[in-house]
Amino acid sequence: MDLFFQKLILQSFIVLNFACYSCVSAANLEATIKFCSTCHGEDGNSVAPNIPKLAGRDPNYIARELNYFSSGKRKSDIMAPVISNVDASQFKELGQYFGKQKSSSDKITDIKAADSGKKIYLDGDEGKGLPACAGCHEPSGAGSSRFPRLAGQHKEYLVRELNKFKTDFHTQESARLMRETAKRMTEAEINDVSEYLSGL
Amino acid sequence: MHRVIATLFLYLMFLSMPLFAQDKPLKNVEGSTSGWNQLSGEKLKALELKGNPISGAEAFKICQGCHKNGAIGTPSGAYPRLAGQYSTVLIEQIADIRSGIRKNPKMEPYSDEHVLSIQEISDIAAYLQSVPIQQNTAGFGSGNELVKGQALYLKDCAVCHGNQGEGNARKFIPLIAGQYYKYLLRELGFIQTEKRGNANPDMVIVLKLYGKEDLEAVADYVSRIPIGK
């Protein structure tokens, strides 16, 4: 086959790929959502307590964290292999899908801990310079695009993440704020605040 | 011909020199080029920016976990009231804490460059200056040495901080009227013992002559100066 036809076929192939991209990607998004839902729940409220709920989290926050997982900026043994199967162009839409779901609340099992946790969450601890979490995460725990929604999140997940901050597992510079804050918390305070937040 | 070109070139260089000038001096403030109150680096950058109080109100959320909603601080003195403080003063203090010139390990991580951008510092400062100051109902000293406190204040402090404790934005002197007693006492102690790190050297000299009761008296007096008088 002469060079002209080879070029024509190659160019057609490339053009067709791009032309069909938008019709293929919609189907792909649905498949990706299904993929994420196996762990995070169809409505974004995961069942397993060590897997975070995504429902009702800010869409920009979700998209940003997906980017961080993808680049390795946010370390996660669980998400690292998973995220390589997801196309980065879908992060924004994934954020929007899960963001508009409604977050559920968990049942509180330790009321005493929750009461103590509420005080820490809303007032912090002046003596040791522990800021009230509510300052950034909002008194309702609803958070923002910058600071995640904590209300209704699984206790086990919150405890784990706070301990990760406390032990410098999350090393990125932007996590300094939380590393310092978690270091100013005792194990009991981490437990109590997480108990309180899970029930919101 | 070459001489003409060379001369023209030099002339053009000469004319364009203002474009190569160093930091243009800030209008409206009086700082130094070195030593105490040196205006340089991030501090200078923040001072040069136009602070947006609306953006600042949003960015202040990072701060309100300690300084509280409305920037009222805590009467216990753990966190000062920031409401109504001059933006110049706030920018200087945040920049000094961030750079470590002012020693404040409790606050330093929360002023980190990954927490606050320079624009945000400027915005927060603009916002805080605009917040109306509420009269305190708590956070005073014993009230037993106010005559002494007033005498000391008028003799030693009013010259910079003003007769009404109103400070001076232009000279980076904080408004201190009605600030919480325990906060004032703590900072006076740090300034006196040179632990603060960014204290005005003149103030250190004055305070070296103060005993414990003098510090308490003057702090108590200042904590009770009516706001906005």
Image (cartoon, rainbow, N blue to C red):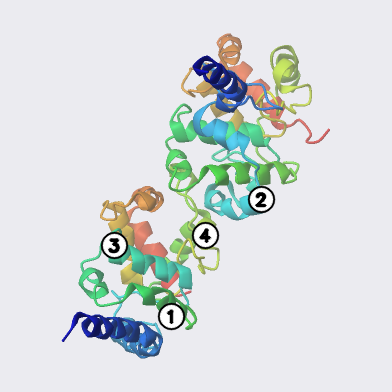
Which subunit holds the residue at mark 4?
Answer: A
Label 1 in the same subunit as label 4: yes
- Which quadrant is the C terminus of chain B positioned in? top right
Which residue position holds label 1? A98
Residue type, mark 3 in image: Ser
Q: Which mark is residue B70?
A: 2
Q: Earlier in the sequence, mark 3 or mark 1?
A: 3
Residue B103 placed where, x, y %? 45, 29
Is residue A104 something one can see in this rendering? Answer: no
Residue type at tag 1: Phe
Q: Secondary structure at mark 1?
A: helix
Indicate which disc residue A132 carries: none
Could you tell whether B170 is left or right of B5 in the image?
right
Q: Amino acid at mark 4?
A: Ala
Mark 2 nearby-residue class (10 Å; few <14, some 14–19, many ≥20): some
**Mark 4, residue position:** A134
Tag nearer the camera, 2 or 1: 1
B120 to B175, vertically: above or below: below
Q: Tell me whether circle 3 and circle 4 mark residues in contact (CB < 8 Å).
A: no
Pointers 3 and 2 within a single chain: no
x then y, percent, for residue A190: 36, 59
Picture quadrant where residue B186 is located = top right
Instruction: Give the CA separation, mark 3 to mark 1.
Output: 21 Å
Give me the C-alpha separation between circle 3 and circle 4: 29 Å
**What crowding class fits label 4: few (fewer than 14 Cα within 10 Å), some (14-19), or many (20 or more)?**
many
Q: Is residue A85 left or right of residue B116?
A: left
| Percent x, y of residue A7 | 25, 80
Badge 2 marks a residue whose secondary structure is: helix
| Residue at (44, 67) in percent of width and height | A61
Task: Tell me whether the residue at label 3 lies in contact with that at label 2, contact meaning CB atoms closer than 8 angstroms.
Answer: no
State the image coordinates of residue B77 (x, y, percent, origin top left): 58, 37
Give the CA distance from mark 2 to mark 4.
14 Å
